[in-house]
Amino acid sequence: MKLACVNGGDIKVERVQGDIEVNNVNGSVALTEISGSAVAHALNGGVVVVFKEVTPGKTMSFSSMNGKVDVSFPESIKAKVVMKTDNGEIFSDYDIQVEPSARQPIVEDSRGKGGKYRVRVDKAVYGTINGGGPEIHFTNFNGNIYIRKTGRVAAREE
């Protein structure tokens, strides 16, 4: 399933099985009791996803520019996680094994071709859940990231 919306409100999907891709500009994304895999992005709204089951081996991504990213997975999920928020914090019910080493800066030198010398620093946090598995990306600019276990009652955060 592939859904997109621009200036038309929120996107809500419930009890769907399969691969889901959702992109919303100026609205939120809510995927509830889904089974499969998902890629979900909201520009000016939150992303809330609750998985009933996850397809093993699928890479997934969840992001927001201005809103929380709140994703719940079955307790047994195995994943490599990449987490980044510029103006927020990261919270998790899982014991994420964070990689101890910092990533090296990426140097791009195109001065010989009339370009510039550029150094980019990767500010993401890398880790694993339950020993690792496919990559799951969590990206946020203005908001928190929540990585939860499905069925766990959570205190209200905003």
Image (spheres, rainbow, N blue to C red):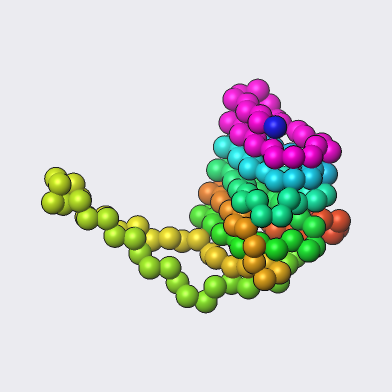
Residue at position x 70%, y 51% in the image? 70
In the picture shown, does residue 140 fall above or below 81?
above
Which residue is at the far front? 57
Q: Which residues are magenta?
A: 2-25
Question: Can residue 45 be spotted in the picture?
Answer: no
Q: Judge whether residue 8 is colored magenta.
A: yes
Question: Can residue 149 be spotted in the picture?
Answer: yes
Which residue is at the far top? 8
Quadrant (top left, top right, bottom left, bottom right) of the N terminus:
top right
| Residue 75: percent from left, percent from top | 80, 62
Would residue 70 appear left or right of 143 to someone viewing this image? right
Q: How many numbered discs sit on the rendered protein?
A: 0
Would residue 66 appear left or right of 105 to someone viewing this image? right
Would residue 132 appear left or right of 18 to someone viewing this image? left
* Residue 134: quadrant of the picture: bottom right
Residue at position x 61%, y 38% in the image? 42
* Residue 35: quadrant of the picture: top right
Main SS class of the magenta portion in the image: strand
Q: Judge whether residue 104 is colored magenta.
A: no
| Residue 68: percent from left, percent from top | 65, 48
In the picture shown, does residue 26 fall above or below 59?
above
| Residue 142: percent from left, percent from top | 56, 48
| Residue 17: percent from left, percent from top | 79, 39
Residue at position x 53%, y 49% in the image? 141
